[in-house]
Image: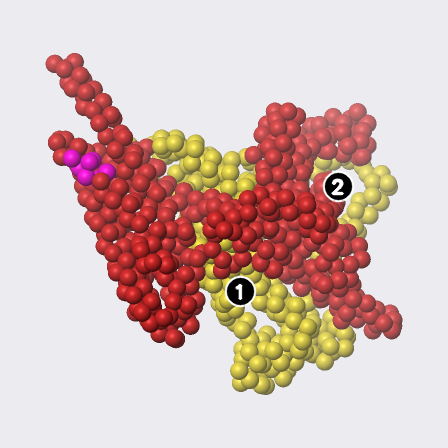
Chain colours: A yellow, B red
Amino acid sequence: MTAKAKQPHAMKIKKSAGDRAFEIILIVLFCLFTLLCVFPFYYLFINTISNNDAVTSGLVNFYPVGVHFTNYTNLLNASDLGNALIVTIARTVLGTALMVLTSAWAGYLVTKQKMWKRKLWYRALVITMYFNAGLVPWYMNMLMLGLTNNFLAYIIPGMVAPYNIILVKTYIESIPASLEESATIDGATTTKVFLRIILPLSVPILATISIFGAVGNWNSFQDSLLLMSGRPDLYTLQHRLYVYLNTTSNLGAVMNAGAGGVNTAAAQSLLNTKVIKYTVSMVTIIPILLVYPFMQRYFVKGIMMGSVKG
Amino acid sequence: MQTAVTAHQNTAHSKRSYGFLIPYWIHRAVILLAGMMVFFSPVNPGRILKQVNENASLFTTAFSYDNIATQLKSAISRSAITEGDIRNVMTGCLIVLVSVLLCAVGGCMSAGNIRMKKRGIIFPIVGSLGMFGGLSVIWNRYRAVYVFVTENNKVSRATPITADGSMPQSILVFGIVAALILLTSLVILALLIKKEQEEKMEMEEKYKLFLMFLPVLLLTFVFAYLPIYGWRFAFFDYKIGDELSASNFVGFHWFSTLVSNEATRADIVRVLKNTLAMSGLGILTSWLPIAFAVLLAEIPSSKFQRFVQTFTTIPNFISWVLVYAIAYAIFSTDGFINSFLTNVVGRATSTDYLANADHIWLKMLLWGTWKGIGWSAIIYIAGIAGIDQQLYEAASVDGANRFQRIWHITVPGLLPTYMVMLLMSIAGILSNGMEQYLVFSNALNKDVIEVLDLYVYNIGIGSGQIPLSTVVGITKSLVGVILLFGANGISKLLRGESII
């Protein structure tokens, strides 16, 4: 599942008392740090499912009090959060799919030695990882392309991801060339070889980059902040959360106004600003925590492949 | 007989190479130029009025009605122009766009054999004529609008792009390009007509592969190289909504402002101090993941190792906004620490640990470490797994204790990887990103948390000082490139291997 370290001392027969003590200290330290990494998520979660009055008085510290789940249902109904959720899911699905397809296609083509001026194009692609023109020129460029206040800005610029292209290229280069050669001799075109041979064989690496792409899209905040200032309905979830976290006035009232004052019952139980902030945070975290256990091996594989120079 | 055939093929080959070369390359270059002009805002034939967004390109104008109409709202409401006018211009732009696309198809087909070339040359001929058509639609509408607004005294609402109603430069430029495409197409057609064509349309493999790769290159160009064109703002006295012209050209004024203007200089020094301090702290603690990995490997249970790894990598996958949300939940006035202290320990007052400027560099370092250490350790954990076990066994036989084995076997084994990471972080010393510092910044800690990237955002997007922030960005990009090459040189010198 994870990158495993072999035991350097596996063959050792007897351990001294000092060794034992050292290991126990280590175990305690690691447990503490692990707790440090996990507790904040747990704390957020118990505060969103506890009695809202208890939360306000700061009584929910280690275990939930008066469990209920209405915060979640109310929040999704009573706010513009649902909108942000749809936008974020749409960009995650579309953006990731297009990025993976482009990376696979580009990664395959750059392995082709025959391509006209291949080295030049490949270099031009790789340089963009290390060099960028700067934030403001980038912004002015997006303005020029009409990609401000436009959902396409979430998807199109992310299609070409040089790092992922390098990963795919490195992976495809490890596939035996004879497979492709025999198909070519049988008369398969480049596109056919790509679809029938390369694509099925590169599923592991494509899974890896799609996980990274999906997490990146889900966590996207900067592009929404910079480009969508005129379209609050296109804010991503992270941006929406950022706005909520920085709202010091009564969030319940703000949301109620946003919902056109219709959903008063929902808003009333949500008048607690703190609970709203916690719940929105939790809505944003939960998907990551849900997919994380299944995806962890891909994450690890990704970083290991990244360390192989392209 | 045999030699005769070869000789014939040779002459055919050389004819193909030299007879076409020059007109074809001019032809393709002009088509490429037309393709680029579609995305350049200064040559936008659709911008017939000064009120139209000067940052919109032909491409934008053709597709985004809102982009143009928002600035023309008052002009429309005072009936200086009509929505029909806008639609009409948009249609013209769309025709030009489609025509350029046709030319591009022809340009691609020109890489094929004679048969394909002959078929392909039709596209740029039709395309260039289409461009003329689209341009004349825009031009006619421009004349009509010009006459209408000048006769009805509505020039202040809808200002035509040329004061005397002559042909706008952008239309002229596009027209010249279209004429060039048409001319080169006709020359090529004349050259082609005499050629014998093959049975089937074919293209050499190397060009086929290139054309398949072309869309990726175009996207790269548009999103990674085209922004460099935005560097021009550094040389103008520019605010959003202004136009770039000779009158507001200021040369290197903004570059010298960086050092000559006292307030700006003080800002830059302060921001650089923050940047270098926080990057420096990061570099000083960059060995922590190694320690994490080495110590974790000392625990003789792979289950425990996996358990720790699983949970300590989670923070790496949440965004900085969420890290801030967690910081808020734990450290704010009514967060965990305070409610624990008041309700469990019984302290009377609560402290806001977030909204103050104390030890902010250290706090940022700790958050960065919390988020990243488990993830950064993975690469070293794998590195440890790759170290030859026999080394440890031999060391044990020789009587080396645990710490000697770590120090003399594990650490040297991980050093090459660490060197790469270290050099990369030194090369990126000026770019610590803005997200972390943006989400944690507030009125109280703004002065000590503002790093270079955040400063560029704050003055550029926040307060609209486009030229100054561009200048800072350019300087940062160039220094970054120099640092990267420097680090790469060091790596080549020390390890005989490049890092980029």
Residue A154 can be seen in this image: no
- Residue A151: image quadrant is bottom left
Give the residue at x 59% y 86%. A265
Left or right, B456 with reference to A231: right
Q: Assess disc 1: are there few (<14), some (14-19) or many (≥20) residues with their C-alpha within 10 Å of its C-alpha.
A: few
Q: Chain of mark 1?
A: A
Give the residues drawn in magenta, as a range: B184-190
The residue nearer to you, when weighing A274 against B179, is: B179
- Residue A256: image quadrant is bottom right
Hey, what amino acid is under mark 1? Ser
Q: Assess disc 2: are there few (<14), some (14-19) or many (≥20) residues with their C-alpha within 10 Å of its C-alpha.
A: few
Q: Which residue in the structure is indicated by mark 1?
A: A229
Q: Is residue B332 above or below residue A222?
A: below
Left or right, B254 with reference to A83: right
- Residue B351: image quadrant is bottom right
Q: Position of residue B282 (x, y in %)?
A: 72, 45
Left or right, B378 with reference to B121: right
Numbered tag placed on residue B284 in the rendering? 2
Mark 1 element type? loop
The residue nearer to you, when weighing A243 against A54, is: A243
